[in-house]
Image (tube, rainbow, N blue to C red):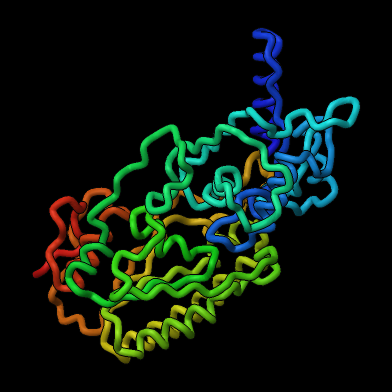
């Protein structure tokens, strides 16, 4: 974090000197403990952020760099996303930038999952998730509209992309019954994101959404997360005979990867590997098809090395991800297609092909071709 905070603070100081403004970093904290909860996993995270940014009630420091460096020194294993909340104060101990009546607040997140809850706290008149105390009357705007169904937030800077013709829409129109399942940390990935940034069902009569509540502790302390519970429920759904299509997300690789703890990462992957194996046994029993893939890497790189010195890597990686089709009824009907620079956008057409449908004209090419 210091690699970004220090040059930002220097730039703000320079602008303030040259232009006569008073630009400062006023408060902060790691996203897993301050402000940026998602999918309503733990509203106390948002409450801590609110009390920090609005009421100035948090651990005081004279600068953001001092705050982060102190937190690093106190716990050398600390990663940025778990840094405790802090507030910057002046020489008299008074917060330099509490959010107050008449202020303008811009949430510059373009992605909605971690922006929705704090947006609600600032914009809802009848807010009941926690006691806001005195809620300042501000002009609040998101970078985008984060939820197109609920129109959160009411004011935003950039029109959100109109995402239509999703796979789920197509399958619902075709009368497919389907399920989506994950634990809280990735539940929105198989619902909200999968549905084109919409929080509601596409067709409630055809769709079943299952959320397994996530743990409310750092994930390196429980790296198995809810993979086993997801697996058990998915097996139940598959064996029910009610569904022709299902999608699930194991959160372990990403959420444990963000902690940077190698031993936890190993346990996380061993758990997911075991769970995938169990699911494939059921898919084989049902003579179905499974696709195994990922939207990005994380645990594939747990450190970086520069000048012989290793540093923990907690960010996503840019490595290609696997795309594996496990088809227990395969009789040579298709083969992998020669697609130039294949990626996630090719999966939609591939899914439709495997389900017996032609690809939608607007979709990128399928990863398979029929022989």
Residue 212: x percent and y percent?
53, 74
Q: Is residue 295 visible?
A: yes
The vertical placement of 5 against 86, above or below, is above
Residue 10: x percent and y percent?
69, 21
The vertical placement of 241 against 324, above or below, is below
Q: Dividing the image into 4 quarters, which one contains the C terminus?
A: bottom left
Residue 86: x percent and y percent?
77, 42
Q: Residue at x 28, y 64 (%)?
A: 168
Name the foreground residue: 129 vs 175: 129
Q: Residue at x 38, y 62 (%)?
A: 200
The vertical placement of 33 against 179, above or below, is above
Which residue occupies the extreme front position in the image? 126
Residue 9: x percent and y percent?
69, 25
Q: Residue at x 68, y 48 (%)?
A: 30
Q: Residue at x 17, y 70 (%)?
A: 174
| Residue 354 shown left or right of residue 265 in the figure | left
Q: Is residue 270 visible?
A: no
Name the foreground residue: 58 vs 357: 58
Which residue occupies the extreme left position in the image? 371
- So how many labels did they put on this image? 0
Q: Dividing the image into 4 quarters, which one contains the N terminus?
A: top right
| Residue 10 shown left or right of residue 345 in the figure | right
């Amino acid at each position: 974090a210091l690699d970004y905070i220090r040059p930002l603070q220097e730039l703000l100081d320079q602008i303030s000197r040259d232009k006569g403004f008073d630009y400062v970093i006023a408060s902060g904290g790691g996203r897993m403990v301050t402000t940026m909860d998602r999918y309503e996993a733990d509203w106390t995270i948002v409450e801590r952020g609110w009390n920090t940014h609005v009421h100035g009630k948090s651990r005081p420091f004279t600068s953001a760099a001092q705050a982060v460096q102190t937190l690093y020194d106190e716990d050398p294993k600390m990663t940025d996303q778990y840094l405790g909340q802090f507030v910057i104060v002046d020489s008299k101990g008074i917060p330099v930038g509490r959010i107050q009546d008449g202020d303008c607040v811009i949430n510059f997140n373009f992605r909605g999952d971690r922006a929705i809850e704090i947006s609600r706290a600032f914009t809802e008149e009848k807010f009941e998730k926690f006691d806001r105390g005195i809620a300042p009357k501000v002009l609040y705007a998101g970078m985008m509209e984060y939820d197109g169904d609920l129109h959160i937030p009411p004011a935003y800077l950039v029109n959100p992309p109109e995402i239509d013709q999703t796979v789920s829409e197509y399958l619902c129109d075709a009368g497919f019954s389907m399920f989506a399942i994950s634990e809280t940390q990735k539940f929105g990935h198989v619902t909200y994101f999968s549905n084109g940034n919409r929080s509601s069902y596409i067709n409630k009569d055809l769709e079943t959404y299952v959320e397994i509540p996530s743990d409310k502790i750092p994930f390196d302390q429980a790296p198995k997360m809810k993979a086993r519970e997801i697996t058990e429920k998915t097996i139940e759904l598959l064996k029910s005979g009610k569904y022709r299509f299902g999608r699930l997300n194991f959160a372990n690789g990403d959420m444990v990867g963000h902690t940077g703890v190698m031993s936890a990462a190993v346990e996380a992957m061993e758990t997911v590997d075991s769970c995938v194996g169990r699911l494939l046994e059921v898919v084989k029993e049902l003579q179905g098809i499974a696709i195994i893939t990922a939207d990005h890497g994380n645990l594939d790189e747990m450190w970086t090395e520069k000048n012989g010195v290793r540093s923990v890597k907690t960010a996503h990686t840019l490595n290609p991800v696997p795309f594996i089709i496990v088809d227990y009824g395969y009789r040579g009907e298709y083969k992998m297609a020669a697609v130039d620079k294949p990626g996630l956008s090719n999966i939609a057409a591939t899914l439709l092909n495997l389900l017996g449908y032609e690809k939608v004209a607007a979709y990128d090419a399928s990863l398979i071709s029929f022989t």
